[in-house]
Structure formats: structure tokens, C-alpha cells
Image (cartoon, grey):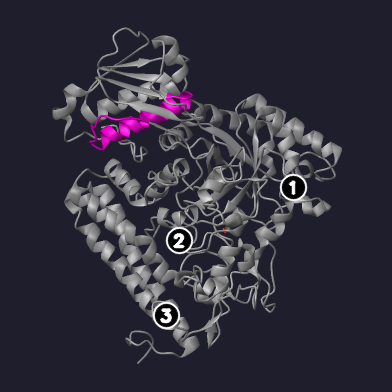
Amino acid sequence: AAEDGSSGWLRYSPSPQANRYYHTLPSQVITLNNTEVSPVYVACLELQKGLQGIFGKRVNVTHENGNASASVIVGTVDKYIKVYGNADEVPKLKEDGFWLSTEHDTVRILGQNERGALYGTFEYLSMLAQGNFSQVTYATNPNAPIRWVNHWDNMDGSIERGYGDRSIFFENGEVVDNPDRASKYARLLASIRINGVIVNNVNANASLLSSRNIEGLGRIADAFRPYGVQLGISLNFASPKLVGGLSTFDPLDASVIAWWTKITDEIYQHIPDMAGYLIKANSEGQPGPLTYNRTLAQGANLFAKALRPHGGIVMFRAFVYNQLNESDWKADRANAAVEFFKDLDGQFDDNVVVQIKYGPIDFQVREPTSPLFGNLYKTSTAIELQVTQEYLGQQCHLVYLPPLWKTVLDFDLRVDNKSSLVSDIISGERFRRPLGGSAAVVNVGTSTTWLGSHLAMSNLYAYGRLAWNPADDPQSMLQDWIRLTFSLDENVINTITKMFMQSWPAYENYSGNLGIQTLTDILYTHFGPNPASQDNNGWGQWTRADHMTIGMDRTVSNGTGFSGQYPPEIAQRYENIDTTPDDLLLWFHHVNYTHRLQSGKTVIQHFYDAHYNGAETAQAFVTMWESLKDKIDSERYNEVLFRQTYQAGHSIVWRDAVSNYYWNLSGIPDEANRVGHH
Ligand code: GCW
């Protein structure tokens, strides 16, 4: 009923148990906060919409607070205390946290702030939509204050690494006039507790800062605000020169400082709650402070000072590296982030957060945790993930990403030989930092499915859940998403769960196993197999494969020294080939194809087997999906079937291209006689 094609997991489709539970449902909503359009106001509308959609029940919203029985009370804890005298049952909440109680004939949803109240409302509705009518009372708080998404949208309306059509924010060099789509997007984001959106590409265009565009950004921010979502922007470091008429963009130059201060003030006039700036500097051709022999910290602090009076923050990306020469055995792009940032620890202003990609290279199918997380003690940090499946099949392959993300979030870096989970570092807890959190690159566009694929939406959903609570379980988050998106039917849940939980391992199997990276075309498309493209260029995503050997020697003893960037316990584990896990073997070591893995197989035989297994699993997804034909509406059934059929074929292309490549190179036959010509 509520479905209009853009509601994602917020469908509120009719409950099969509607009759049974109708009488237990609240019959009115009591709102405590009465500002016109605010998160609490939106929460009330959402409750009306949800109860109507799921149960066909109309409820009124009232400000009266007489008899609260059979009601939902929604508002902030502070307001609740004013109206009802106390909130003694509610534990102390962190910013954006909420308390939900569905017991004793009254549902109470109380947020630390209005945003929290909205989050609690979505939580309650999510329970109902999933057929969960249990009586609960609990509080929940975010792991970290920064839970953002980053868009790589260009001013012309295209999206870098975008696979869901055109930008919802920009077209023809300007901000779009109609913010409706932005508002629908903010609703989805609020339901997964995302509180900030960087709307434009990190490869930023300085024309974003024209008065007309700043005004346009104001419109988008207005559309986000009722959902508790703040807008932020990426900046081009050279803007003072490119659009400001100055002859320099030196971050220590007085005229440059004045220019950024003025622009920042102007932006805050239009967007009083602007979240902050995201900066990609001195990376992949982008301008930055190094041009003027200033440090990256000086570059970051330039913006930090302009933002400080307004409460904004700078997300400064650690993705800085140079082109390298492969003939140098010790050259290693993986070393770059620590080399650029370690010595700057302590030099960043307090409202700067260094945003670190999960792995040291670039969103590969398997990477070790970025060692930079364990090297910054006096700097706030955030992790950067990708919902956009850039190297991971570009939304044409099913890859459910949370299990990959968890390998990093749950990773214990053992800094000072003490427990140092990445999730506790980015929360600010481990090093007692004031800020921290997560950012994910998201490429939603004008596609009716947002991401260009129904199934890919699971990754956006789960990203928000993990940003709030990194201890959440990938499979149980997935099953919530399946119930909300498709059905409460056990068979549907089990089948889709099986597909998804096999999807990342399958993709890893046929696209680059044992830590060799994603063997895709790295020069242009980042799509499809091209193992030869990894080497003999300056990008540093090398495999160093020849006719006898393969892998990057990243040891301290004989290689690039990368393993030495980790704290001692971890460094030792990776330095030693016997304690390096098989799935990262070729990341850290250069070995013969005949080297035996811990599994007992040789490297080359593992390659062959993995590629055949992976492709076989992808074939099975088609049959699994087909078994759900009568249980899913035909539109979504067919759209997914189309993509799964494509993946099934493309996985064979991957399998054959990679297997044949290494068979040709090594001349070692497949024990099972599948590879090559016989
Ligand atoms: O993964 C690479 C992408 C670039 C991207 C860059 C980055 C926005 O291929 O398209 O640029 O990373 O993260 O800055």
C-alpha cells in the first residue's frame, strides 16, 4: 500500500497477522515536541503511515497528554520529564540515543534528542513490520557520533563509480531544483540512523561554491533536516585560485584563510547546521597543501579553523599515495597512508577526523586492516567503507558486504599489546578521542531501486546498522532486511540468507583469492577480469606474478616492510609465512605456485579450485532465486533474476580468464583437468 518504488526497506506492507494483533495496537500518537517540521513531527507521520500500511489502522496525532493508555508517546526525554514528571526508568542516553518501551499498554519512544526519537520510531515500526509483537524495554546508543555517507556525485549529474543512474542532487552544473528525491533519501537514511551526507564527489569541482549553488545546497539541507540528516560538502583545495580570483591556494596565506572563512560563513548563513567538509588532497591529481610545502595537517587545519565557530568538522581523507615504480622491490603503495600520516599525529585540530579506507590499497575484495588505525593516538579517526560495489561487481554481482566489513571492524590491532578493535578506535574509545565514526561511499541515484539493484540495498541497510552498532551480526541484520524488503515467509528468508551469506566468499573465489586483490581491470573500468592489468604500471596494485612465483613480499626482512607498520603482535603474525592466514598469503608473501597452504593445497591448485567453486556457487544463486518465483512480486522477481543470470554467466568469464591466465603463466596443470586445452 505504502509502496511507491522508492521506499526501500520501508515498505510497510500489510501484515499477515493484522487481524490477530489489531486490538493490541496503539490508537493514538501523543507527541511531546511540537515544533512545526522536525524529527519528532516526522516520527508522528511515520507512525501514522506505518500503522496504516501494516495494519490498516488509522491513528490520530495529538498534543494532549491526558490518558496515555493505548497510545504511542514520542518525544525527547527532556520533554517527557516536563510533561510526566520524571523518566526515572530511562538510563542516561548518549547523543542520538533512544529508549523504547512497548510494555504496559503504552508505547514510549524517548530520544536523547529529536533525532533519537525518530530513530526509536523507526525501530518500533521495524519490529511491527517484521511481525515482532514482543514486549520490550531497552535503550540503545550509537557507537560513534559520525555516521555519514559520502556521495561521489559530479556537478554535471554523473556519478563517479555510480551504478544507479544519475545524481539526485546535481544536474547541468547546478543543484537540482526539486528536493523531493533528497527528502525520500533522507527518510531511508534516518531509518538506519545515518546523520550526515556529503553530497558531492571528493574529486570536487570548485564551482560548487558559487552563490547560486550554495543557495541550492540550502534547499537540499532543508529537505534533509526534518530527518535529522545534516548536509556536508567535499571541497576542491585549490578553490581560492580556481573560483576565488586569488593567485594562490597556500593554506598559510592570509588571503586564502580569509577567503575560506568568508565562504564558510556564507554557507552557514544558508545551512546553519552544516555538518562539515570532506577533503581529498594531494591524491590522484587533486590539489593540496603539499604544493606549497605545507603539511597535510596544515591543510586540514585551515578548514578546521573556518568551521570551528560553527561547530562543523573536517573529514580529511588518508587516501594519499604516489605512483610507484615496480622495478623497485621495496616500493609499496600499501605503505603510503602510514608514511604520510603517522608523523602528523598530534598536529590536527580537535575538529579534524582522518578518514581511513578499510584496507591499505583500495576497497579490494580482501585486504588486511589498514595499519593506520593503529598508528594515530592523538587524532580522531573514521573508517571509510564502500556500499558502491566499485571493484566488487558494480551491483551486477550479488555481494553482501557486512562479512567483509566485519573482518576490519572486529580486527584487534593489539596496540601496546592491549585489546584495540578497530570499532573501538573509530568510536574514540580506545584512544579517548572526542570524535570518530564511519563514512560509506554510496552511489544511490535516480534509479527506482536507488542503487540500480534491489539486492544491493541490503548493503546500505546494514551499513547504517553497523555504524550504530559494529557488533551487530551480519546474518541477523540481513534477515531483518529480508523481512522488511521481501517477505516474512520462512522459505524466502532461508533461501535469500543462504545466497547472501555465500556471496562474498563466492566473489572472492572467482575474482581474486589468497589476498592477491581483485584481479579486475584496474586501468579503466574496474569491472571484469584482467589479471594482467595489475602489473607493469605505476598504480601499485601489483601481484608480481611471473612463471614461477606470485605475491607481494611485504615483510620487513625481505620485502617492502609493510608488515612492520602494524603493532608488534600483528606485525609478527604477518611477517611469518606460517602464521599468515591463507586468505592473506599473497598479500604478504611472494611464493612459488607450488607453495603449500595451511589447507594442504598448493597455491595454484587453490586458484583453480576456488575459481571453479566460486562460479559454481554463482550458478546456484539462479536456481535458488527461481525457487522463490511464486513468493515475490513479478517485477522484483524478474529484475533480480536478470541480474543473477548475468552474474552466473560473468562468473564463468571470470573463472576461465583467471584460471587460464595463471595456467598459461605457470604451465602447471589443474589436477582436476578443467583448466586449459587438453
Ligand atoms: O577507488 C578509487 C576510485 C576513484 C576514487 C578514488 C578515491 C573518487 O577508482 O574513482 O575517486 O578511489 O577514493 O578517491
Q: Amino acid at mark 2?
A: Leu
Task: Identify which residue is drawn at 59% across, 32% down.
Answer: 217
Q: Is residue 131 magenta?
A: yes
Query: From mark 1 to mark 2, how far is it between C-alphas?
Result: 32 Å
- Among all residues in the image, which is located at the extreme front? 417
Question: For mark 3, does the 10 Å Cα neighbourhood hold few (<14), some (14 to 19), or many (20 or more) residues?
Answer: many
Query: From mark 3 to mark 2, how far is it between C-alphas?
Result: 19 Å
Q: Quadrant of the C terminus?
A: bottom left
Above or below — where is 197 with respect to 571?
Answer: above
- Residue 460 vs residue 541: left or right? left
Is tag 3's residue or tag 2's residue first in the polypeptide sequence? 2
Is tag 1's residue or tag 2's residue first in the polypeptide sequence? 1
Residue 249: image location, x then y, percent: 80, 45
Is tag 1's residue or tag 3's residue first in the polypeptide sequence? 1
In what quadrant does ligand 1 lie?
Answer: bottom right
Residue 76: image location, x then y, percent: 45, 20
| Residue carrying label 1 | 297
* Kind of element beneath mark 1: helix
Question: For mark 2, does the 10 Å Cα neighbourhood hold few (<14), some (14 to 19), or many (20 or more) residues?
Answer: many
* Kind of element beneath mark 2: loop
Range of magenta residues? 111-138
